[in-house]
Image (spheres, rainbow, N blue to C red):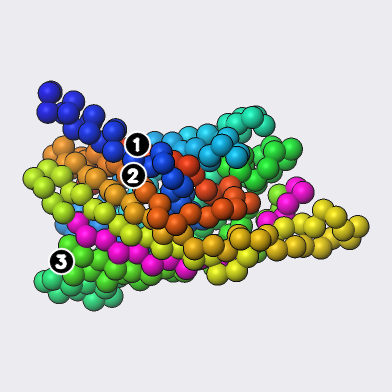
Amino acid sequence: MKKMIKVLCSLLSLPVLTVTGFAQCSDAGVCQVGNFFNEEEKKISFSLSYKNGYSGKDDDVTFNSFQFNSEYRIFSGSSVSLVIPYNFQSGPGGYVNGLGDIIVSWNLELFSDETASISSSLGLKLATGDENKDSKLPQIYQPGLGSNDVIFTIDYSYDNFSIGTGYQLAGGRNNKEGLKLKRGDDLLVRTSYAFPFNEFIVTPLLLLIKRLSKSSVLNLNSTTESFVEVDKSDQLQLNLLAKVQYFLNEDFSILAEAAIPFLKREVNIDGLKRAYSLSLGLQTTLN
């Protein structure tokens, strides 16, 4: 029991590292596809996690989310994955909650030997979250982004080292009243190294995300419908993300994440920027 209490305290304290900056994988979805580690002998995995974040003083919005993840191995080297978030946003403007944008993906191992592997994923971020859940409030309060996006990733792993890239094709303009946001596409480059310590696996990741074009929104100064680009909405992001997994036994593990930004975006028109973020969850894998 004492050992369990120490483990939980350690995992809960880890995400406090994110308070000093803007962690940004609370992204549009590309960070959550690919690079899966479901053990070959396991048929299916489930996880339920709680996430908390804060936008920063400019918007002063707090985010809470419960997220369900699952991965099902169809056959050797191939699996399908599902991410379902339910989001809560609160701030000076009010309180909004609702189902977020669901992500489904197909993951395929392209090559594998005793030490190295190449895998790829093709995913869809579905506009299941309502971008007009409270139409009087800005995008940052809404549970969804309002676009159907296509996501592609490819990862190379050698022993405990992994490097990969991803691309998120933004699915067009949303229907947010007074905004009608159209995001640019996102390019992701990530690298990681897993350090196993007895029952723990600690995995630091470097995540670089480049918005390839500026976002555009409704021009409120025009008498006809027209759109204007948002300055600095295509800035580069670079984050250090740390994942910790503690194995309770061969079927259950505790998951925690923390992120420290090296480069941060100044503009938060899509509501994705966080002054801090933390996550704690439980995962189970079954034959």
From the image, tell me which residue sits under label 3: 159
Earlier sequence position, callout 2 versus callout 1: 1
Amino acid at circle 3: Asp
Going by the image, does 7 lie left or right of 177?
Answer: left
Earlier sequence position, callout 3 versus callout 1: 1
Percent position (x, y) of residue 255? Answer: 27, 42
Residue at disc 3, secondary structure? loop
From the image, tell me which residue sits under label 1: 16
The mark closer to the camera, 2 or 1, is 1
Going by the image, does 87 lie left or right of 111?
Answer: right
Based on the displayed image, in which of its 4 quarters is residue 40 positioned? bottom left
The mark closer to the camera, 3 or 2, is 2
Q: Which residues are magenta?
A: 177-194
Based on the displayed image, in which of its 4 quarters is residue 160 positioned? bottom left
Going by the image, does 145 lie left or right of 67?
Answer: right
Percent position (x, y) of residue 256? Answer: 29, 41
**Which mark identifies residue 162?**
none
Note whether 94 is above or below 245 in the view shown: above
Amino acid at circle 1: Val
Percent position (x, y) of residue 144? Answer: 58, 47
